[in-house]
Amino acid sequence: MKEHLTQMRRRTVLLGAAGASLGWAAGPAQAQASAWPTKPVNLVVPFPAGGGTDAFARPLAAQFSKATGKTLVIDNRGGAGGTVGASFASKAAPDGYTLFMGAVHHAIAPSMYPKLDYDLERDFVPLYLLANVPQVVVVNPRNVPASNFQQFMDFVKRNPAKLNYGSAGAGTSHHLAGELFKQQTGTFITHIPYRGAGPALQDLIGGQVDMMFDGLGSSAAHIKAGRVKAMMVSGSKRNPAFPDVPCAAEVGLPDYTVTTWYGLWAPKGTPADVQARIVDEVRKLGTAEELKTIWASNGAEFGGMTQQQFAAMVSSEVKRWAAVVKASGAKLD
């Protein structure tokens, strides 16, 4: 009996020491999550500077630095409709210091690029929906002399196969929006893919391409400056930032409901507590008046979804765009 009690005391001491050891090991991990960020954070933007993703990423980075005292480094890695940057980000260390700012294009990519070396839903953790904006049909006013949508359509129909449209790349929402437009209006406009919306917009402004089906976020400043002219926004209502631009439903295209959304992901394996810390910080950034003003001027809304809701939305969009790609017959060109 005495020996049994002695063994129990020894076991208790050993268990207590192991528990203390485990507690010591967990402490730094918890502290790391609560202290995030302790160093600069890399934000992979999978398009060149000047596009729609950049229009939201850079103001977000500026606000992040003000709020945390740490730098959010914009890492532009364009190519292949945003899939080059996505591939790079998917292989980054899952420690909370490499984030990925993707977009609706990445929900389309699985249907357009069958040999991707990453899977959006398998290799990333969805964190937050950052912005949601309608597509807008914009034209170079010298190439397309139209002051309203009806004049624009008349011009397109009088010039079959003579006009072209730029996109952020094959398989992006810009590309698919153009294909849907052609399908629903019975017109033909040649697709010219670029390595991002920024370069495509510059060529649109310069007159090298005639038009774009762009996300409103990247075109907004150019519309306001008169460098390009907006013919319509997608969906069933006008955008508050551009109340004079008609919506698709008004001009006889009730099923033209293409939108561009931008979201934040982390590589798969990022600890749950670090994810929660990132989401909390980003949600707070959205309450800053400066960001609210920028988002509103770009015709966008900030966030509003939980991680679970964002994940469900992404899954839904992957399925939706697979059906659109199949119906439109869109191909890489």
Image (cartoon, grey):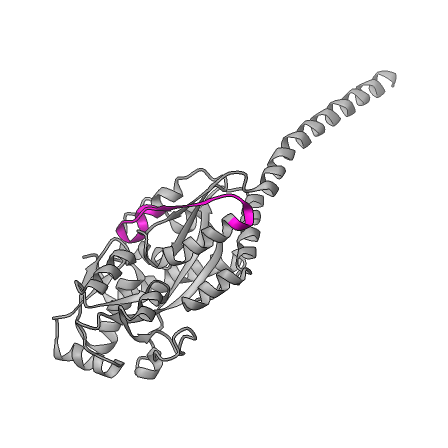
Question: Does 75 lie within the magenta span?
Answer: yes
**147 or 136, which is in the foreground?**
147
Q: Position of residue 226 (x, y in %)?
A: 29, 71
Q: Position of residue 33 (x, y in %)?
A: 58, 41
Asked whether, in this view, residue 169 is left or right of residue 271, the answer is: left
Q: Quadrant of residue 18?
A: top right
Q: Residue at x 34, y 50 (%)?
A: 46
Q: Residue at x 41, y 39 (%)?
A: 92
- Residue at the limit of the structure toward the top, as seen here: 3
Residue 239, placed above or below residue 298: below
Q: Position of residue 185 (x, y in %)?
A: 23, 77
Q: Position of residue 215 (x, y in %)?
A: 34, 65
Question: Does 119 lie within the magenta span?
Answer: no
Which quadrant holds the C terminus?
bottom left
Which quadrant holds the N terminus?
top right
Residue 133, placed above or below residue 19: below
Q: Residue at x 53, y 63 (%)?
A: 289
**200 or 223, which is in the foreground?**
223
Write the start and end of the magenta stretch as one range: 66-86
Residue 213, placed above or below residue 151: above
The answer to whether residue 303 shows anywhere in this view is: no
